[in-house]
Amino acid sequence: MESGILLDHAMRQLGMQPDGRAGLSCGEWAALTVTGGFANVTQLLNYQHVGLPLPNLVYLAAAIGADVLRETLATTQRMADVAVSHDNSPSQSVACGPIEGIEILREVLKSRGVITQELAVRSGFHVPAFAPHVDAMLGFLELEVQPPSAEVWSCVSATPFPREKSGCAQLLRRHFVEPVNFRSLVRSMHADGYRVFIELGSGALSAMVADTLDGMPHVALPAAHHSRPGLESLQRALLGLWTAHVDVDPFALTPRPRTHAVT
């Protein structure tokens, strides 16, 4: 989350003023943080869940769409406690549940030739099983949401955050127990006129955007990459935006020679 906040500040200093922001799970919190959507972020930015009880649930990413994954869960025994937590793109979704159920699901998908990968997190966010922990989490993080100062799209509702505080509070609670609808989010933003998507992190969101908008006019660029230094990644992002006719200075990060006055 911190990297997203840092890159948001960096891109704005380089002249980029986004029409809107969105995120996948905690990336949405970064978007709310930089737009004033949280009244207090001290505890959030120093988050350590030591001592905070969380459900011990496993996430399993699968190289299939969420609709196929849901059908698999519905037709496989002992899947009552496993749910789809992320609808990321037409070819990627995530299931979340107890280790026993996830292991059964993994074997079923393997038998069908589906590639899977267990994720290195066990928060239990985005499934109904987290419902008993919502109040404790909100209190622990001291999260009080309010209408952001700029447009932020929800990864749950696939719509912008409401302009009233009560609606924002309800949406935040849904964030913990309902699945991420990133595929619907991207398509809704595209239908609303968004064409350029900049990923403020080193994940795979730009690839998910490209997968979701395949065949539609768009540009999806990462502002950071794990295999490149930060400055080089920003330079590549700026150049990509420039070639997409976005009004940026592609030389903004290039050191320029000093000029010497002649007397």
Image (cartoon, rainbow, N blue to C red):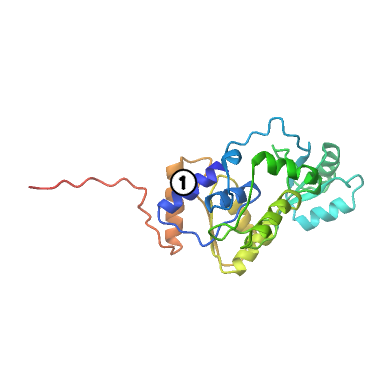
Residue drawn 43% across the image and 61% down it: 243
Looking at the image, which residue is at 76% across and 37% down? Answer: 54
Q: Position of residue 55 (x, y in %)?
A: 78, 38
For mark 1, what is the residue?
233
Horizontal and vertical percent position of residue 57 = 78, 39
Residue 49 visible within the image: yes
- Outermost residue toward the right? 77
Q: Is residue 188 above or below residue 236?
A: below
In the figure, is residue 129 to the left or right of 21?
A: right
Which secondary structure lies at badge 1? helix
**Residue 52: x and y, percent?**
72, 34
Count the labels in the image: 1
Splitting the image into 4 quarters, where does residue 22 fall? bottom right
Q: Position of residue 9 (x, y in %)?
A: 46, 49
**Residue depicted at 56% across the width and 65% down the height:** 194
Amino acid on which disc 1 is placed:
Ser
Q: Is residue 227 rendered to the left or right of residue 112?
A: left
Side of 9 where 256 appears, left or right: left
Q: Which part of the image, by quadrant, shows the N terminus? A: top right
Q: Residue furthest left?
A: 263
At horizontal 64% and vertical 42% (from top left) the residue drawn is: 142
Residue 60 in view of the camera:
no
How packed is label 1: few (under 14 Cα within 10 Å), some, or many (20 or more)?
Answer: some
